[in-house]
Amino acid sequence: MKQTTAAQTHGYTADREALIKRLHRIEGQVRGVERMLAEDRYCIDIITQISAITTALDSLAFRILDQHVNHCVAGALASGDEQVAAEKSRELLDAVHRFARAR
């Protein structure tokens, strides 16, 4: 369900700036790997950096998922609207399945 008014927020809204800063740091890590490749650095060093990037992205995803559960899903369940609660529950399960398949 898409939010349609400015007054409505998403679970990550209060933490948005910190999340954006984290993404910028991850972006810098990716550029670092690109430089390592251009400099013909040792394979294991590059793989180590890629692993760190993957871990950072996973951590960010878990943080956003946690905020989604605690804000969006919890709000839908507390609303008493069975249709909205069912939709948010399906959305959550779909997200968890996508996340699990990526592993």
Image: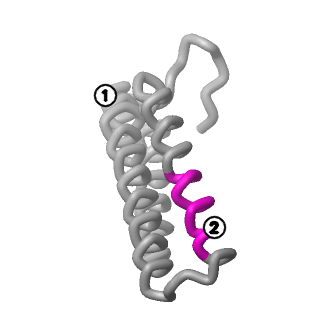
- List x then y, in percent, for residue 93: 42, 59
Which residue is found at the position 46% from the left and 81% from the top? 47
Q: Which residue is mark 2?
A: 35
Q: Which residues are magenta?
A: 26-36
- List x then y, in percent, for residue 49: 45, 71
Which residue is found at the position 50% from the left and 88% from the top? 43
Amino acid type for the residue under numbered disc 2: Arg
Element carrying mark 2:
helix
- Determine the image quadrant of residue 48: bottom left
The foreground one among 39 and 56 is 39
Report the number of discs: 2
Q: Do the CB atoms of the residues marked 2 and 1 lie less than 8 Å apart? A: no
Task: Name the residue furthest bottom.
Answer: 43
- In magenta segment, residue 54: no
The foreground one among 46 and 50 is 46
Q: In whole angstroms, how far apart are the C-alphas of marks 2 and 1?
A: 49 Å
Which residue is found at the position 41% from the left and 44% from the top? 64
Q: Which residue is mark 1?
A: 78
The foreground one among 10 and 63 is 63
Colour option used: one colour
Q: Is residue 79 left or right of residue 36?
A: left
- List x then y, in percent, for residue 89: 41, 49
Amino acid type for the residue under numbered disc 1: Ala
- List x then y, in percent, for residue 84: 48, 37
